[in-house]
Amino acid sequence: MKGDHIILSPSQNNPKRFFPEELIPNMAPPHHLRLLEAPEADYFTAESLERFFAPHGAGCTVSGHSNRNGIRLEGQPLEFKPGMNKSIISEGILPGTVQIPGDGMPILTLHERTIGGYARLGVLARVDVDNLAHLKPGDPVRFEKISLEEAEKLWQEKIRLESFLIES
């Protein structure tokens, strides 16, 4: 209420702690996201997949048409192989699933979306899902395909570093 006063006293025993630099995500574009292959990854032409995963290629750009359900990406569309369905039977999806609707433009699903009916190119490695919060319209995004074993190794390393912080 107007006129109220809050009396604060100095904090005591506030040890200085430092956050390990390797746990601070790089928030500067281009954003590098690691992807595990999903069931419909073979729906797309080899050329469009090569372009999508090119380490120094054009990649994708975050669209201004993103919302709480998903981050839409712009760029050169992924091409479906001739005769492939451009949608699948709707089923549960994980946050970080990369879905490709009929127009070929990827959508990174977020936590609000739990069911999807577009072909799934991949799923972000769990270690990178939180990095989606740093993407903003116009930011370039590049993808790297990794194995399940590598994704698990990256996750275990993150857990180890975070537990070090809690114990310190």
Image (tube, rainbow, N blue to C red):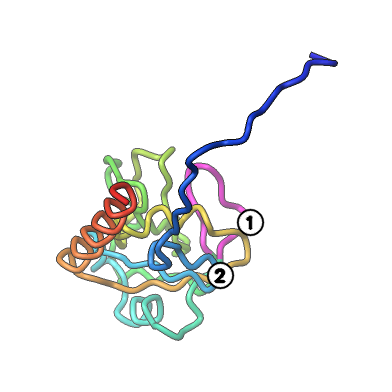
Where does label 2 land, which residue?
Answer: 28
Was residue 66 drawn as part of the magenta stretch in this picture? yes
The kind of residue tagged 1 is Gly
Other residues around mark 1 within 10 Å, as few (<14) / some (14–19) / many (≥20): few
Q: Provide residue 72's location: percent of width, then percent of height.
A: 52, 56
- For label 2, the crowd category at 10 Å Cα-Cα, with few meaning under 14, some 14 to 19 and many 20 or more, is few
Which badge, 1 or 2, is on the more N-terminal residue?
Answer: 2
The single residue placed furthest to the left in the displayed view is: 149
Q: Amino acid at mark 2?
A: Ala
Say which residue appears at 28% left-offset and 48% top-offset.
167
Q: Is residue 161 above or below residue 77?
A: above
Quadrant in which residue 83 is drawn: bottom left
Q: Quadrant of the N terminus?
A: top right
Picture quadrant where residue 149 is located: bottom left
For the residue pair 156 and 164, the one nearer the viewer reads as: 164
How far across and down, in percent of the image, does residue 120 sit?
A: 31, 57
Viewer-nearest residue: 29 or 83 = 29
In the picture, measured across the screen, residue 138 lies left or right of residue 132, that is right
Q: Residue at x 79, y 16 (%)?
A: 4
Q: Secondary structure at mark 1?
A: loop
SS for callout 2: loop
Q: Which mark is residue 64?
A: 1
In this view, 48 is above or below 113 = below
Figure disc tally: 2
In this view, the residue farthest toward the bottom is 56
Relative height, residue 156 to residue 68 (above, below): below
Give the residues drawn in magenta, as a range.
62-73
Q: Which residue corresponds to the image point at 21% horizontal and 58% vertical from the top-left? A: 156
